[in-house]
């Protein structure tokens, strides 16, 4: 009877030990997955200068230059070509959430890709259609 009790308690202890290690291993796997996603984005450095000629409804294009620095500051300069020679500026802070770049004081966001930023529509969705490939800022520095 006493041996039986020792065996049962040993089995229960062994099962608890296995379940405990299983939980630790699962947490480790989840942490590794999150770290891998973070590292994938970190592999694409968003810091730099981007330029492009974005579509414009009532002008030739919107020539745009966007600079992002290490201190999370941005400067965006743009000109409505064929409409005005005035150069407009936006300044502020930038942030990244997953693979989306947001600029303070700017209504639209950008999807981060290797060496380029793809402008998203005002609801944060990818732009599709014939002009989709024109909503791109290419990294120049």
Image (cartoon, helix red, strand yellow):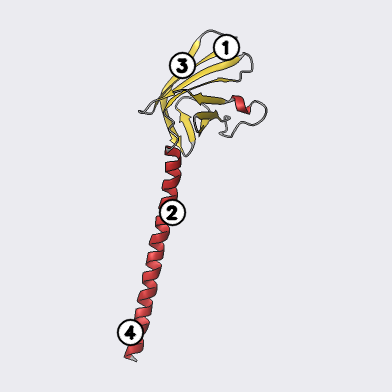
Q: Earlier in the sequence, mark 1 or mark 2?
A: 2
Mark 2 to mark 3 CA distance (whole Å): 42 Å
Please tell me which residue is depicted at 59% across the width and 16% down the height of the picture. Answer: 61
Judging by the rendered image, the residue that carries numbered circle 4 is: 6
Give the x, y percent position of residue 35: 41, 47
Judging by the rendered image, the residue that carries numbered circle 2 is: 30
Judging by the rendered image, the residue that carries numbered circle 1 is: 81
Q: Nearer the viewer, residue 101 or 104?
A: 101
Q: Nearer the viewer, residue 56 or 38?
A: 38
Q: Earlier in the sequence, mark 4 or mark 3?
A: 4
| Label 2 element class | helix
Please tell me which residue is depicted at 56% across the width and 26% down the height of the picture. Answer: 136
How would you rate the neighbour count of disc 3 (Cα within 10 Å): few for under 14, some for 14-19, many for 20 or more?
few
Mark 1 to mark 2 CA distance (whole Å): 49 Å
Tag nearer the camera, 1 or 3: 1
Rendering quarter of residue 16: bottom left
Mark 2 to mark 4 CA distance (whole Å): 36 Å
* Pointer 2 with pointer 4, Cβ within 8 A: no
| Label 3 element class | strand
Mark 1 to mark 3 CA distance (whole Å): 15 Å
How would you rate the neighbour count of disc 2 (Cα within 10 Å): few for under 14, some for 14-19, many for 20 or more?
few
Mark 4 to mark 1 CA distance (whole Å): 85 Å
Rendering quarter of residue 5: bottom left
Reply above or below: 134 against 86: below
Reply above or below: 14 against 41: below
Q: Earlier in the sequence, mark 2 or mark 3?
A: 2
Tag nearer the camera, 2 or 3: 2
Judging by the rendered image, the residue that carries numbered circle 3 is: 89
């Amino acid at each position: 009877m006493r041996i039986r009790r020792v065996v049962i308690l040993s089995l229960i202890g062994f099962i608890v030990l296995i379940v405990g290690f299983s939980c630790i291993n699962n947490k480790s796997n989840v942490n590794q997955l999150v770290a891998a996603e973070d590292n994938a984005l970190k592999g694409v450095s968003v810091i730099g200068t981007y330029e492009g000629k974005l579509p414009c409804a009532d002008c030739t294009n919107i020539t745009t230059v966007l600079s992002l620095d290490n201190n999370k500051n941005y400067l965006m300069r743009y000109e409505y070509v064929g409409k005005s020679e005035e150069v407009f500026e936006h300044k502020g802070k930038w942030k990244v959430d997953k693979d989306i770049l947001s600029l303070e004081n700017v209504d639209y966001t950008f999807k981060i890709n290797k060496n380029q930023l793809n402008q998203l529509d005002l609801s944060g969705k990818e732009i599709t259609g014939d002009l989709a490939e024109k909503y791109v800022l290419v990294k120049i520095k």
